[in-house]
Amino acid sequence: MLSYRHAFHAGNAADVVKHTVLAFCLDYLAKKETAFAYIDTHAGAGAYNLEEGYASQNREWESGVSLVLKKFPGNAPLAGRPRDTDGGENSPLMAPYLACLKTGFGALRYPGSPLIAKGLLRKQDRAHCFELHPADFAALDHTLKGDTRFSVQCEDGLSALKGLLPPPQKRGLIFIDPSYEIKDDYTKIPLVLEECLRRFPGGLYLLWFPLLRQDSPGAAASRNLDLGLPGLDTKRRCILSVQQKGDRLGRGLYGSALFIINPPWTLKAALDRELPALASLLGLDRDVRWEEHRVAK
Ligand code: SAM
């Protein structure tokens, strides 16, 4: 039985970075008229009310999305905000994410990855979302009810993924955002990615993983992901991480990273320009590595 609930962490600094890049990539795919597929293997509950339930306990969002909304107050949901405040119009990296906050943030309702996709998919696009936790699945199913572009299933997303590739649209973003509660995830993911790339080498893949202090269970496996999965055959990839300042001794998480395969060509300039300010706003260090044409040995 899964016990991880994303609501505890909704809108925290890691979510901000991950959802900023996700929204940027979806927006990039949507710039071309032809349809694309979005596959979310670990979709979560879809939307999170930050002032209630789990999200209100540790209030992790106060050091995440709250800071973003203070910097870009034009996206605050509250009525009566000044009209000429910064809404992120001059921030190509942040703009798609900020637009999703504006529509999703009604009563401090933070949009998870499926709602970000809902905001950015067009009528010709299709989405498959998987969520194994029964309560989060029910919430997600309810939130997406009536949107015929979305299929939502209470199934193992990692196992279902390969059956969906290549997508009929021949264009697609695959978002893999496990909780790593099941320790097998670390060993499964490289194999799943290998198979996915064989079936759909041109897909845009976004994998999230935690950066773990050296004595944490899973630290070596997470380090392997951070090394960029030696052995995986890709044309272009990027590993982007944000990290707490200070040492890496002991246990627990010191940061998080995104492994992006076939990133949009516009992402590098956007990250160069805006990631330093975003990381500094969140009080984090950042690191971005790009690699071209890595071929498996
Ligand atoms: N992607 C979400 C977002 O950005 O808003 C957050 C997802 S959360 C990090 C991971 C979710 O995956 C949890 O809700 C967990 O219940 C679910 N989960 C864990 N293993 C899964 C699996 N094999 N297939 C589908 N869902 C899984």
Image (cartoon, rainbow, N blue to C red):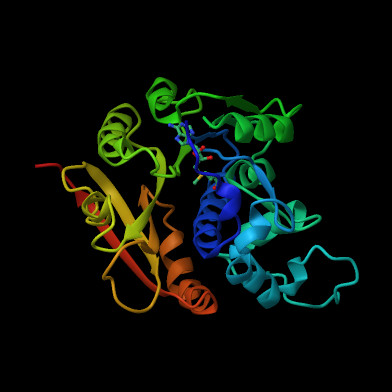
Tell me: 191 left or right of 58.
left
Residue 90 visible from this viewpoint: no
Q: Is residue 266 above or below residue 34?
A: below
Give the residue drawn at x 21%, y 41%: 233
Image quadrant in which you'd find residue 265: bottom left
Give the residue drawn at x 78%, y 77%: 85
Q: Is residue 253 above or below residue 230?
A: below
Q: Is residue 36 above or below residue 246?
A: above
Image quadrant in which you'd find residue 107: bottom right
Give the residue drawn at x 35%, y 31%: 200
Horizontal and vertical percent for residue 263? 40, 51
Image quadrant in which you'd find residue 59: bottom right
Horizontal and vertical percent for residue 103? 76, 53
Is residue 219 or residue 83 the one in the foreground? 219
Tell me: 85 left or right of 192.
right
Is residue 135 or residue 267 the one in the foreground? 135
Residue 48 visible from this viewpoint: yes
Q: Identify the residue at the far top of this view.
A: 163
**Quadrant placement of the C terminus:** top left
Q: Is residue 168 above or below residue 211?
A: above
Give the residue drawn at x 27%, y 50%: 218
Horizontal and vertical percent for residue 246? 34, 79
Q: Identify the residue at the far left of this view.
A: 297
Horizontal and vertical percent for residue 194? 26, 34
Q: State the count of labels.
A: 0
